[in-house]
Image (spheres, rainbow, N blue to C red):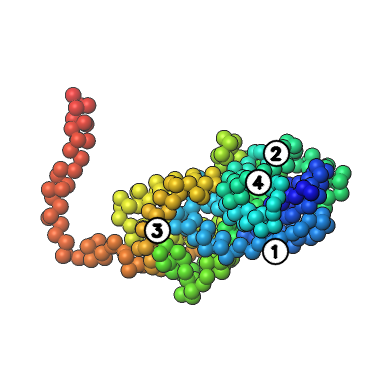
Amino acid sequence: MKKALVVYSGGLDTTVCIPVLKEEGFDEIHTVTVDVGQPEADIEQASERARLLGTKHTVVDAKATFASDYCMPAIAFNADYFGYPLSTAIARPLIAMEAARVAKQNGPFDAIVHGCTGKGNDQFRIEFGLRQHAPGIPIRAIIRERNWTRSEEIEYAEKVGAPIAQSKVKIWSIDENLWGRSIEGGRLEDPSFEPPEEIFQWTTSPERAPDESTIVEIGFQCGKPVALDGKSLPALELIARCNEIAGMNGVGRIDMMEDRMIGLKVRENYECPGAVLLIAAHKALEALVCAPHERRFKQLVDAEWADLVYKGLWSDPLFEDLTAFCQQIQSRVEGVVRVKLYKGSLTVIGRQSPWALYSEADASFDDASFDQNAMAGMVQTHGMSSLLFSRLKEK
Ligand code: ARG
């Protein structure tokens, strides 16, 4: 009796794994789909295909955990990998952890199987998470092992009669969760090809967005968004609502060149309306409450965090160190940020916080309590070495 568990999205890559495993003599195949906010139809398609393929199927609803334990830290760290809010990246460790849990509950398994190709980042993230949470179970990467191209996968699926009907006509490779949607492949592989309107699902084109702007007020506590327009909302609903509001105003489209872990440059398109909105608001609040040297240091911390997350290393010691530092700062990231959304643009138009390191009296042009004369000495000695340098060059 040979048992395998497939980390199953229901798409082409993971679907073809199942007949391969059967051919290899696995007689009991389990599938697990982790719901991190992908479309309901995808979850249903996975369940239907699992039924047709005769696997023992489990769906794990991890949406709320994903929102509170993965998206919220992404906001606190202003998630940004060269312009990418890390939407796919932050979901992989959770998917791996939940799959490992299912493996332990229904095991023992002879293999735990994923459908990542050998070209992407997800093979690193998923396998690291599986080795962390389900140590000892052999990991199989069927597509990578066979070195299959997309057309070879389709050809094989048709030969063995695997249910891939819709996947076959899909031109784009899409990955979707609550934090964002990624679109790759097809003609988008040509970096000079303009993304056609049809690739977008979450965002209205700026041209077609409403002629009236939308103003949204986001309330933060401890660096976490907790309220929208004065109404308290749990993380999951708040992010979903931000995706809608920003998306309908054409905000959140990202078209970029991305440097993958293996050293490959690829063209990526993302729709991350909620992430773009929430991170912009969070940054505006940090700018109000953080000291200048804190802000500069936090940028370094954010960049290191993004790099670890891109690589899927959620349990690196540095990850924990950065988290401790970030939490300390976030305790003051409290207040309200007002943002205007209009035809693809996002503008912070107001911010307030009980922790603001800002004195209107001192900064005002109309105030006399700050003695300007006190500055004379400081200004006179400003740039002493710079000045010396320029004198030396003149000689
Ligand atoms: N390049 C992104 C990342 O590595 C997203 C990849 C998403 N996959 C997809 N099939 N569109 O995080």
Q: Amino acid at mark 3?
A: Gln
Residue pointed to by mark 4? 137
Residue 197 versus residue 42: which sits nearer the camera?
42
Using the numbered discs, state the Cα–Cα distance from disc 2 to disc 1 in whole angstroms: 28 Å
Tell me, yes or no, if residue 111 can be seen here: yes
Q: Which mark is first along the chain, 1 or 2?
A: 1
Label 1, label 3: how many angstroms apart (C-alpha)?
Answer: 34 Å
**If you read the primary sequence from the N terminus, does the residue marked by circle 4 or circle 2 appear first?**
4
Q: In the picture provided, is 333 more to the left or to the right than 170?
A: left
Q: CA distance from mark 4 to mark 2?
A: 18 Å
Instruction: Please state which amino acid type lies under the numbered disc 2.
Output: Arg
Q: Residue at left 72%, top 41%?
A: 143
Tell me which numbered mark, 4 or 3, is placed earlier along the sequence. 4
Residue at the image point whose x is 45% and y is 64% from the top: 224
Among numbered discs 1 and 3, the one appearing first in the sequence:
1
- Measured from the top left, where is residue 369 in percent x and y? 16, 65
Residue under label 2: 144
- Asked whether the viewer can see residue 344, the reply is no
Looking at the rendering, which quadrant does residue 386 occupy?
top left
303 or 104, which is in the foreground? Answer: 104
Q: Is 151 left, or right, of 376 in this rendering? A: right
Residue 40: give its label. Answer: 1
Which of the two discs, 4 and 1, sits closer to the camera?
Answer: 4
* Residue 258 percent across, percent down from the top left: 56, 42
- Ranked by sequence position, the earlier of labels 4 and 1 is 1
